[in-house]
Image: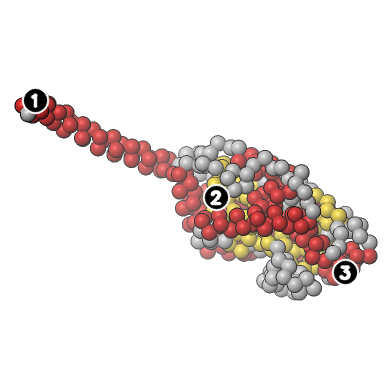
Amino acid sequence: MYRMNQLRRLIAPATACLLPMAAACILFAAGLDQAAAQAFPARPVALVVPYPAGGSADILARAVGQKLGERLGQPVVVENKGGAGTAIGARFVAEAPADGYTLLLGTVSSHAINPAINKVGYDPLRGFTLVAPVAATPFVLVTPPGSPFKTLADVIDAAKRQPETLDYASAGPGTSNHLAGEMLASATGIRLVHVPYRGSAPALVDVMAGHIPLMFDLQTTSVPNVRQGKLRALAVTSLQRSALLPDVPTVAESGIPGFEVSAWFAVFAPANVPPQALARLRAEMSAIMRSEDLRQQLRQIGAEPDQRSADAFAAYLEEEVEKYAAVVKAAGLAPR
């Protein structure tokens, strides 16, 4: 007992010294975490668009990037990395350092459609961390102003008379407007010829010039061209008519009940991005998506703001992956 009491008397002072040191260590670690959270971002952030400049995704990215940069206190630089139906840009981000400084404006093409058709080199679900959804928009089936097509029925009749002679443009293999054409062909029993481009902007140039007769273009870019007489709108792919094109019927109204296709956009980071950086990015994206200024800006270009939570959109993303895998299988677009 005497020895035990001696041992306690020896240990007690050491314990008394160690406890404040442990508390100090805990406070120091907490301070480091707080400093790390406050430090991000310490330099410009890249927002990669997997399409060339000038298309719908590019327009959205620049609108969001400007607002996000203002909130972060650092420039958000939009970088266009088009090609391979969004795979080049998406793979670039998936392989980038997971530090929060390289983001992707992902789309239904990069995350649901292209991976179902092609070997893209990344996992659309496990290869990224969702930051926040941004917006969604329908497509508009457009044709050159001098085209003989006045309605969707005209297109279907022509395709039935001469199968595999009617071309339609897309932003690339595996993109959403590619699948929109495949879905129309499947729903009507016609056979169209797919002509892929390296983005929607160059595809639209050829459609407006009359080199390609058809394209499912996103509403964000088609509306200005329709209003300026550079394109003729035949149908929109939403179930209700577009407020921006109230005189244009839906595909469903045009004789294909239930037909609906839309494109969505969301911001992603590489997988395993640091929690502090992710929390900051999500907080600022949430703030700008609540901004009436940005919401009006998106609506003016034909996109509907998406204010779902990250968890809700992540569940929706899984559904989209399954949905388009089934569409690709039904269309006979075997993975390459």
Of circles 2 and 3, the one toward us is 2
Q: Which residue is mark 2?
A: 130
Residue drawn at (78%, 71%) of the image: 256
- Residue type beneath disc 2: Leu
Farthest residue, direction front: 1
**Image quarter of residue 137:** bottom right
CA–CA distance between discs 2 and 1?
A: 61 Å
Farthest residue, direction left: 2
Q: Pointers 1 and 3 in contact (CB under 8 A)? A: no
Q: Nearer the viewer, residue 158 or 244?
A: 158
Q: Secondary structure at mark 3?
A: helix
Q: Which mark is first along the chain, 3 or 2?
A: 2
User: Which labelled disc corresponds to residue 154?
Assistant: 3
User: Which labelled disc corresponds to residue 240?
Assistant: none
Q: Nearer the viewer, residue 72 or 228?
A: 72
Q: Nearer the viewer, residue 246 or 309?
A: 309
Residue 168 horizontal side relative to residue 285, left or right: right
Q: In this picture, is 253 found above or below 42?
A: below
CA–CA distance between discs 2 and 3?
A: 42 Å
Q: Which residue is mark 1?
A: 3
